[in-house]
Image: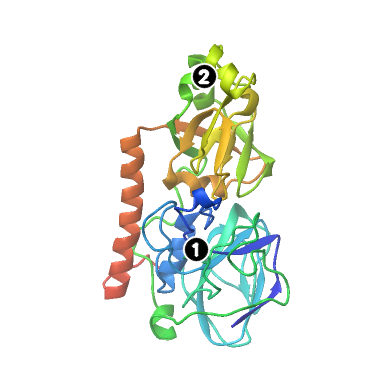
Amino acid sequence: MIEVLDGGVQTTVQDGGRPGNLAAGYPPAGAQDYYALSIANLLVGNELTPPPMSAAPPGHAGLEMLIKGASLRFEGDAVFALAGADMGGTLDGKPVERYRPIRAASGSVLKLGFVRSGARGYFATAGGIDVPLCLKSRSTYIRARRGGLEGRPLRAGDRLRLGERTAPLAALAGRRLPAALPVEPAEPRSIRVVLGPQDYMFTAESIETFLSHDWELSPVSDRMGMRLIGPPLTLHERPEYLVRDAGTGVADIVDDVIPIGGIQVPGGIEPIVMGVENPTAGGYAKIATVISADLGKMGQIMPRQTLRFAAVSQAEAIAIRESQWRALKESDAALRSGCSAAHPE
């Protein structure tokens, strides 16, 4: 068991989410930065966290921490790992590194503070966080109060049950990531997108502006949508049928499904990147869609920081995702076989 001493700003139980339930009103939820949680799970011998909307199992559940991390007391011996944002973690007052497994004795206290870099930190422990399944996932859908621990962020006094670990603690504590596996993106502020599905509604000049301008992340952002501050984007004159069927707003469309990462532009201003708790449908034109491999990058940008978009083809987006997921699975296989070339000490 783990006792929560301080829940931080917003700490939730997350795994790979529950895709396939939009018709029932459930977005997938899950980790906003799947790659970071997958790295943490990899280090402690858990099942990997798959990319968003994947057909793969959701993997073991861990904790996602926003802006300020949690403080946790281990009620038994454990091995844990930290990934994603640097929250200056300490175990019984001594600094602990990210991206490597850490042995914790019963009674030890892990404290995580405000972020030094990034926005979301991830915690995984051998065996995973064992909360009840909701639609085959343990992830927390905050807005509907479903999944996770009572559908809410953690708070002081909560106690988390752990699942069964896959190997002895000593063996897990000795794991190291393969040297070829990157732990953080090379270009954290460059977000790759596939244009569309309604990019044809925007003028060529606006498409160019969208791809060449630095966008600032608004504080009015969360796991449902991340709002951007920048120049207005101009749309073509609306055809009569669209005025009749969707309304007079410059970006109004007949409601359609919103993909995770879809970038709505209500009124042609302040684009909104849809997160893992995205609405099931919406009525605004979407200029582009963030590729699934870069959704984690979006989740690590702090309010008031800037980013820039880069267009790729659908084929490129698929190849990037497949390469990223393949690298994680190959690293998992290497660690399980005990033949990985570790990162240097």
Q: Position of residue 333 (x, y in %)?
A: 29, 68
Q: Is residue 342 left or right of residue 43?
A: left
* Residue 268 position in % (x across, y down): 62, 23
Percent x, y for residue 343?
A: 37, 65
Q: Quadrant of the N terminus?
A: bottom right
Q: Which residue is mark 2?
A: 202
Residue 279, placed above or below residue 177: above
**Type of residue at label 2?**
Phe
- Residue at image coords 35%, 32%: 313
Observer-nearest of 88 and 219: 219
Q: Pointer 2: residues within 10 angstroms few (<14), some, or many (20+)?
A: many
**Camera-side residue of 250 and 216:** 250
Q: Is residue 227 visible?
A: yes
- Residue type at mark 1 is Leu
Q: How is the image coloured?
A: rainbow
Residue 233 is marked as: none
Can residue 338 be seen here? The reply is no
Q: Are marks 1 and 2 in contact (CB under 8 Å)?
A: no
> Which residue is found at the position 56% from the left and 74% from the top?
131
| The quadrant where residue 4 appears | bottom right
Residue positioned 57% across, 80% down in the render:
161
In the image, 328: left or right of 203? left
Q: Label 1: how many residues lie within 10 Å, few (<14), some (14-19) or many (20+)?
A: some
Residue on which the image places disc 1: 135
Number of numbered discs overlaid on the protein picture:
2
Q: Residue 90 location in percent, x, y? A: 62, 72
